[in-house]
Image: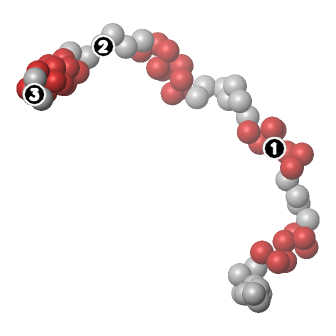
């Protein structure tokens, strides 16, 4: 058997997706995209203990002072 039957099935599925949209829960979408109030997961609080406010430790990160290591 050739590719004809598989291609026909793919075409049928593509047409169904194109012309018939599934039922969407618009209320859930609005809650997710609304952003009302504080976020349920605040990344700033999660990583606050890892933030280093001391800029002196990052002097090596300056690309102007970087020297290529020798082999």
Disc 2 and disc 1: Cα gap in Å?
39 Å
The answer to whether any part of residue 19 appears in the image is no
Locate residue 43 relative to residue 23 in the image: left or right. Answer: right
SS at mark 2 in the image: loop
Quadrant in the rendering for residue 46: top right
Which is closer to the viewer, label 1 or label 3? 3
Residue, x 46% and y 13% (percent of image)? 27
Residue, x 58% and y 28% (percent of image)? 35
Disc 2 and disc 3: Cα gap in Å?
31 Å
Whether tag 2 and tag 1 are in contact, CB under 8 A, the answer is: no
Q: How is the image coloured?
A: secondary structure
Question: Which mark is first along the chain, 1 or 2?
Answer: 2
Q: Quadrant of the C terminus?
A: bottom right
Circle 1 residue: 47
Question: Does 3 sit above or below residue 66?
Answer: above
Question: Which mark is first along the chain, 3 or 1?
Answer: 3
Quadrant in the rendering for residue 36: top right
Locate residue 60 relative to residue 2 in the image: left or right. Answer: right
Mark 1 burial class by Cα count in 10 Å: few <14, some 14-19, many 20+: few
Viewer-side residue, 42 vs 19: 19
Viewer-side residue, 60 vs 55: 60
Residue, x 16% and y 24% (percent of image)? 6
Circle 2 residue: 22
Locate residue 12 relative to residue 30 in the image: left or right. Answer: left
Question: Which mark is first along the chain, 3 or 2?
Answer: 3
Circle 3 residue: 2
Viewer-side residue, 8 vs 14: 8
Residue 62 on image: x %, y %: 76, 79
């Amino acid at each position: 058997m050739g590719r004809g039957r598989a291609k026909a099935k793919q075409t049928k599925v593509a047409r169904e997706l194109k012309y018939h949209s599934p039922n969407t829960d618009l209320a859930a979408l609005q809650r997710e995209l609304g952003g009302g109030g504080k976020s349920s997961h605040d990344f700033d609080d999660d990583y606050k203990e890892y933030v280093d406010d001391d800029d002196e430790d990052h002097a090596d990160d300056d690309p102007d002072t970087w020297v290529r290591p020798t082999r």
